[in-house]
Image (cartoon, rainbow, N blue to C red):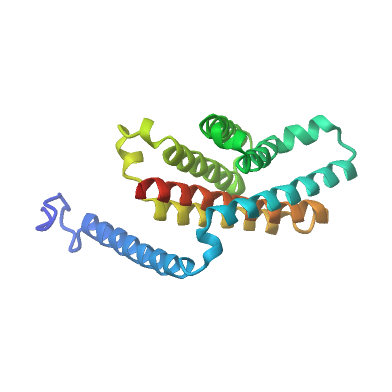
Amino acid sequence: MKCKKCKREIENLKVCPYCKAKNIKDSVVKNTTKAIDQVDKEIKGIAFLNSPRQITNALIIGLLIYMLFSIADNYVSNNGLLDLIGNSFFYIYLTIYFLLLKTQFGQERFSYMNVILGALLGIHLIGSLFNILTTFNFTMIFNLVVDLLLFIYFISSFFKKYLNKIEWIKGMNNKIIFYILCIVILIFYLLLLIKYVSVLPVLKILRYIVELFVLLLFSRYIYLYKKFKEMK
């Protein structure tokens, strides 16, 4: 017996499971898109979140606060300078990246800085992949998803002209991937805070909170850059 709608074999079932799954998927996509459009409409009214200059300034402040917490935590834990650099290298570079964007030197070498940042995001992604192979849990899964989405989102935005032949990257919706990434980041850090809030010192908890806001602002920075390039 075949379904009259999709023509697939469904034996003697009264309801086609393929059509039912498609209807559920379409409903979820429709509701999600509607919710995203509603949130985006509200955010468009917030000048700060639509200003690349203000986002960059907020990122510099957030990153400097993050580095301050990292140095303090490193000192309290009695770790060496190499531990600090090793644990915070990505954020150290991100701080330098946004500080240099304020200078003519950085603006002239914008493309080169993006190559380095893309490479660091790739290294982060590889590190998350190795972590999940050794420690498999929900926290590690969300960590991997965050790093994967950030890497794909960054390279698809800043290196789009080199990736135009890849259909799935070419067809990526800037707005949808931005909100998906923000949701995943929020879930990941919520899991971290729930898991460690009772065992970690205050400095590390504060560092996690600042790190959360830095990644959300960084995602918004990528979104605004991609939006700007698409409007040109």
The residue positioned farthest toward the front in the image shown? 104
**What residue sits 50% from the left and 40% below the top?**
148
Q: Nearer the viewer, residue 33 or 68?
A: 68
Q: Is residue 137 visible?
A: yes
Q: Nearer the viewer, residue 40 or 195?
A: 40
Report the label total. 0
Name the spot of residue 31 as percent of width and height, x first.
35, 66
Q: Quadrant of residue 44?
A: bottom left
**What residue sits 73% from the left and 36% below the top?**
87
**Is residue 38 placed above or below 137 in the rendered structure?**
below
**Is residue 76 placed above or below 113 in the rendered structure?**
below
Q: Quadrant of residue 137?
A: top right
Q: Is residue 170 left or right of residue 2?
A: right
Name the spot of residue 150 as percent of width and height, x first.
51, 43
Q: Is residue 162 left or right of residue 115?
A: left
Name the spot of residue 214 as percent of width and height, x first.
63, 51
**What residue sits 82% from the left and 56% below the top?**
202
Q: Is residue 216 visible?
A: no
Q: Nearer the viewer, residue 163 or 229?
A: 229
**What residue sits 57% from the left and 34% below the top?**
117
Name the spot of residue 196 as percent of width and height, x first.
74, 54
